[in-house]
Image (spheres, rainbow, N blue to C red):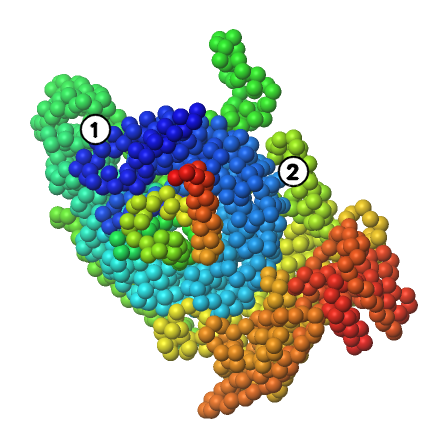
Amino acid sequence: MIKAILIFNNHGKPRLIRFYQYFAEDLQQQIIRETFHLVSKRDDNVCNFLEGGSLIGGSDYKLIYRHYATLYFVFCVDSSESELGILDLIQVFVETLDKCFENVCELDLIFHMDKVHYILQEVVMGGMVLETNMNEIVAQVEVQTRMEKSEVKLSRPSG
Amino acid sequence: MALKIVKGSIDRMFDKNLQDLVRGIRNHKEDEAKYISTCIDEIKQELKQDNIAVKANAVCKLTYLQMLGYDVSWAAFNIVEVMSSSKFTYKRIGYLAASQCFHESTDVIMLTTNQIRKDLSSPNQYDTGVALTGLSCFVTPDLARDLANDIMTLMSHTKPYIRKKAVLIMYKVFLKYPESLRPAFPRLKEKLEDPDPGVQSAAVNVICELARRNPKNYLSLAPLFFKLMTSSTNNWVLIKIIKLFGALTPLEPRLGKKLIEPLTNLIHSTSAMSLLYECVNTVIAVLISLSSGMPNHSASIQLCVQKLRILIEDSDQNLKYLGLLAMSKILKTHPKSVQSHKDLILQCLDDKDESIRLRALDLLYGMVSKKNLMEIVKKLMLHVDKAEGTTYRDELLTKIIDICSQSNYQYITNFEWYISILVELTRLEGTRHGHLIASQMLDVAIRVKAIRVFAVAQMATLLDNAHLMTGNVQRKGICEVLYAAAWICGEFSEHLENPMQTLEAMLRPKVATLPGHIQAVYVQNAAKLFATLLKNQEGNTDRTAAQETSQLMIDRLPLFVQSANLEVQERASCILQLVKYIQKLQQKDVEVAEEVIALFAGELNPVAPKAQKKVPVPEGLDLDAWINEPPSESESEDEQPKAIFAKEEPKHSRARHTEVDEKELAKRREARKQEQANNPFYIKASPSSQKVYQEAPGVEHIPVVQIDLSVPLKVPGLPMSDQYVKLEEERRQKERVEKKKKEKKKRKEKRGGRGKKHDSGPESEEDITPAHMVDIVTEEMPENALPSDDDDKDPNDPHKALDIDLDNLVEMAGRRPLADSEKLPVRSHRAAEALKSPAEDGDAESPASQEPKKKSSKEKREKKKDKDGDRKKSKDDKKKKKKHKREEKGEDLFGGQADEPVVQSEEISEVAAPPASNAAEVSDLDFWLSNAPVPSNAQEAATLAAEAAPVPEKASGTAPDSEPDEPEETDKKSSKHKKKKQKREKEEKEKKKKKKHHHHHHHSDGGGEESVQNGTVEEEEPLPPMSNYCLLAENSYIKMEIDIQGNLQDGSQVVVSVIFENKCDNFLKTMEFNVLDSLNSKLQRPEGSGPHDGLSVPFQLPPGVSNEARFVFTMQSIVMPQKLKGTLTFIIKNEDSSTHEKLDFKLHFTCSSYLITTPCYSDAFAKLLESGDLKCSSVRLEGVNMPFHHLLARICFHHHFSVVERIDSCASMYSRSIQGHHVCLLVKTSGQTVSIDAKCDEPTLLGNVLDEIKQTFSQC
């Protein structure tokens, strides 16, 4: 199970948070801070796995992360997930974002947090991996975007 | 109305949308909070409007603010409003917001039930999808109960997109509403074979999650997962399944045996590192489960460890980390194998990456021995000094203590050394683990009597230098150590060198700055010290010393009497008054020392932490019964419904009652723990108190052993543990010398009888005797304690509720059908559906329930055999053995391969004949497991696995090549013998498989029909052995046998399994398999290779060994049989030369190989025949001289049919091609003539299949 997915930038500003277990808002912020603190002090050439987040998880949980330019993608998972598998999944997720936003950058995530959520929803659901095939994910996201667009047109036939 | 709409849209133009909000926040960096609060006010205004678009926009902004840490739960109701919009756009916004901020105690959730139900049944699949996604995040027990049935219906939705989401969310539903697991499980299982890979993956995901927590309930699914593993191409699915198998193998070692081969194949064939690593991991799990208790198989483990070492040495940090992780799994069962890599692991401790250092630390735990403990700890102490960052240093500290104290201080030979290590640790800055060190000091001082003198001396020094610890605010955690020091000095004050000085140190004014609980201990123990001092001083003639001591107490104690801490105050004032009274007596020259000492007399024995819980409840004592009358019901109206509830549903209310108790108990336990921690008289757990308890002869009998005088007891200042390391080494050296001397003496006496036996080789573990035989005083347990240890489980674990026996649901619908109460709550019009599904599944599975019959018949046969033979005695022996086997299954893995299947089945029918229900399902699994394929020897398996091991080969160059040679050589000798065995085994296996098929389909037509009589099975003779592997080509070097199977997953694929057998005495290498493609059939080659390139066979063959490889072919049309020409090229390598050879072959794809055994029920079969779409054809076979059931079995086996129904000498059979053509047969026999009427929607295919059937029977 995936317990949480956090995306934040090099300064620890959250760009997307998705907890699959309930934490109150202030605790969520604390977790983000702690995770950022743990992850940001690591070099780029060390391993992508981290143990020891005290607020989230416990002994069975691990942080698996990737660092892309200005953004950290952190998945907090338990031992039922394969470490390298999750790394691949992050890659799939980022590539999907890249496809959907056409050359994704941090600004896309900042201004379209909702869309990023919708994309993530096609990849992970309720903490479990739903789909790993990028084409399938992109296809489903696009159909829904089209639906949304047609509804907007309907609601404003004049304008 | 229209005006309102217009007004609404005008308003909207001025509204901020999400982008505006984000921009605004970015532009107000200095006063962000203020800006956001005005935004929230705006949002509140927007939410008040009727326009749903405005509301949705507002909710969307709230979702963003929630991410920034703002509590938006006040808008929960508005979120529900937006969720219920009919527009997808808004609905999606609503559900997203809900999934981000709703949780179990959000009260508006209960308003959503109907809305969600409506969305779930929406004609638009994306409405349904959005609802499912949202629900997966905020499902509550109530929602789960109310919606379970709707979601279950969605599991069979026409759209795979919905199916996969519905399957996945079921896991969440199970967690919240465990009662739904049993009714939903059959359908979930069915989804494992869903045509859509996404749905399949979801089902695998869910079952793996379930099985991870309660693996034993899912053991019976192993065959299904095995099938998936060998057929699936989705790496995610494979990883999940392989991980699951890793969890299952410890429960069933035979499973591991079966897994080795496909796992090895995967390792060879996959390019995904993630999959490869999981394969290796599971192979390790298998080897561990196989080799536990079999010492001679640790060689294969050794091999794995070597390969992991290569991983760890890799430059990729991720691999290094994972290598260490995998190593720790081996460590648990085979610490010795890992120990030899100490150098590497210690080296990892220096890694710059903290994750890796932590992993390495974990490994150290299992690597210590008596011999190397001191050395390792010394190294760790160095790291403690160097380590930056307190977390890592704290981790080091706990690890040092863990390592030393593990299994009751098993590895400590010198406790002086350990105490000095503990004292050195107190010098750590800013550690949080002062209490840990303190409890270790207490534990050692109390339980190791011989060390007390030394410990007391050290503690006295600590107390003297207490200012070092209390001075710095940062060092707060460490002052806990003083608690232990004070207590030890007080309790064992008779050992103190200079008690007066210690008493002085304990009563310094600075002490008042310590935390209250420590001061309290100081005060109490000062009193103890005082008592000892009095006793010493009264012996003297000079009385003034004693009086001075009393005066000191009276002078210093008032400071503590003023303490704000109640405990300190109370103790201090008590003791102060006592001392004052003593002083009065002293002035009258009365001897008081004896009486004062009596205050603290008596030995304190450590009590095991679980002692209290282990006391069994005496008979006749009902702890739940009211002692007094329960409070009267009429006290308040609120209580009334409760009482009624209790009466109506006693069972339920009882459960709640205990739940409350559990909580309260947990609280009390916590409180008690707290108390224990602060109570010096209570000794904490040592890791294996249980074991000790069993062996303990009793505290009184333990002799207190003299201390070795070679160890100096006085160490000036703070001790350096290094001194003790040196001393210890000297001592060991001395011991060794002495031993040698003794041996020499012995040898002289013996006069060279077996002179060279004891050469002074490297010191072995057992040779080191502890410095002084330390008696570890054991913890006390109540006399009639129960030696159970099951109280460690967390009662709040949600997975506990999911520990539900699913086997007899799935396999044995007849035995334990779903009770009415277990059915899911349904709204009336869906009732029919819900009832149907489990029942249907039950039918499909019912053959299993017939199994016992078959078994019993076998048993009879077995008995006959025994009567005929002269082995009555041996049978008895066997029986005995078998009973053993049940308990130690590991054993039958290696011994007695060939006769295993028979033995196994007989045994099971014997053991479980009467209860039957459980046995049937167990034996089903047993049956599947007992025909485990080829590599039965763990050694060989390891070689395979190791050869395949990941990067190693690339990374290490030549090294690995030389390593595996050794085991292979040992294999050579046995290989011929083994092969025979394998063959026999395979035959047997096929026989069985056949039989199973046969019976399976017999029974599958439902229990009601008369067509199969119970007796028939017994009358039938056993089937002759059959094999689908037929010879492909052969020369003097190599033999190839093939089997061709259609691929159910893909209508155009056929899988060709080829067994390569090396017939010569040389190594066969670089085998290449190539086929000339035709227009219709093509060999699937990896991307990037040309159409004429050969495929390299992913293994090499040592002499006499055979191995199997699979090749996939793509077919366009399958109605005609195909022939393809091909070549196998290979290199024969002998000692000094290598030669190229080739072998030509012709691959023959029969039409039967395109058929896939598919069960069909008689009603569906009848419908199919009636449909009229099928073309007819028939064939007659003359001179077939074999029993009818053999004939059917042959058709089933060679042509992949299944029997639909059989009545006397007439049977209907069914099969389906990979492209979905139905093939139906009606087989009749009279005398030696067999007539087959056949129908199929593709006449050419049918004609060819019939021709092939004819040929099968003409051959025999």
Measured along the vertical axis of the image, is residue B998 above or below residue B1084?
above
Q: Kindly indicate the quadrant of the structure image that contains residue B307.
A: bottom left
Please provide percent x and percent y for residue A20. 41, 41
Q: Name the residue rendered at 66%, 50% in the picture.
A: B921
Q: Secondary structure at mark 1?
A: helix
Q: Name the residue rendered at 58%, 75% in the picture.
A: B1082
Q: How many marks?
A: 2
Q: Name the residue rendered at 39%, 69% in the picture.
A: B951
Q: Is residue B1189 left or right of residue B197?
A: right
Amino acid at dot 1? Gly
Amino acid at dot 2? Ala
Identify the residue under disc 2: B834
Q: Kindly indicate the quadrant of the structure image that contains residue B91.
A: top left
- Badge 2 local density, few (<14 within 10 Å), some, or many (20+)? some
| Callout 1: chain | B
| Callout 2: chain | B
Q: Nearer the viewer, residue B734 or A91?
A: A91
Please provide percent x and percent y for residue B1185. 86, 71
Identify the residue under disc 1: B516
Q: Name the residue rendered at 27%, 61% in the picture.
A: A45
Q: Is residue B272 left or right of residue B858?
A: left
Q: Is residue B896 visible?
A: no
- Give the CA distance from mark 1 to mark 2: 64 Å
- Which residue is outermost to the front? A158
Q: Can you say which quadrant of the picture contains the C terminus of chain A? A: top left
Which marked residue is nearer to the observer: mark 1 or mark 2?
Answer: 2
Which mark sits nearer the N-terminus, 1 or 2? 1
Please provide percent x and percent y for residue B864. 80, 61
Please provide percent x and percent y for residue B403. 32, 52
